[in-house]
Image: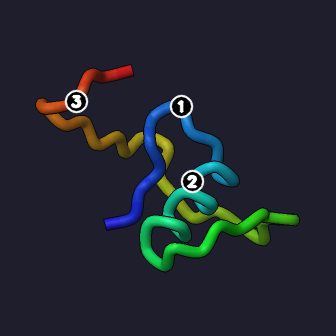
Amino acid sequence: MGKMEIGETPSQCAVRETEEETGVRVEPVGILGIYSDPGHIVAYTDRPFG
């Protein structure tokens, strides 16, 4: 499931997720839009928070 990591920028997320899913390293030149709820944070107990 693709999601942004805490402290990650949208561009960093796009690069990481694309590489994880396809094996292709990309370089974003622009972002058209971001659809998200900034109040929605997913925290896992097996990883440090923050």
Q: Residue at position x 22%, y 30% from top?
A: 47
Label 3 close to label 2 by CB (< 8 Å)? no
According to the picture, the residue beneath numbered tag 1 turns out to be 7
Relative to 15, is 30 on the left or the right? Answer: right
| Residue 11 in picture, x, y percent from top left | 69, 53
Q: Could you tell me which secondary element the residue under label 1 belongs to?
A: loop
Q: Amino acid at mark 2?
A: Cys
For label 2, the residue is 13
Q: What whole-number distance in Å separates the C-alpha atoms at marks 3 and 2? A: 18 Å
Q: Are marks 1 and 3 in contact (CB under 8 Å)?
A: no
**First of labels 1, 2 by sequence position:** 1
User: Crowding at label 3, few (<14), some or many (≥20) Cα neighbours within 10 Å?
Assistant: few
Name the image quarter holding residue 2: bottom left
In this rendered view, identify the residue nearer to me: 26 or 2.
26
User: Which residue: 43% across, 74% down?
Assistant: 21
Secondary structure at numbered mark 3: loop
Quarter assignment of residue 43: top left
Density class for disc 2 (Cα within 10 Å; few <14, some 14-19, many ≥20) is some
- Extreme-right residue of the structure: 29
- The residues bearing labels 1 and 2 have C-alpha atoms spaced at a distance of 10 Å
In this view, 31 is above or below 44: below
Q: Amino acid at mark 1?
A: Gly
Number of the front mark, 1 or 3? 3
Q: Residue furthest bottom?
A: 22
As shown in the figure, which amino acid type bears the numbered disc 3?
Arg
Instruction: Give the residue pinned by disc 3.
Output: 47
Residue 44, numbered circle? none
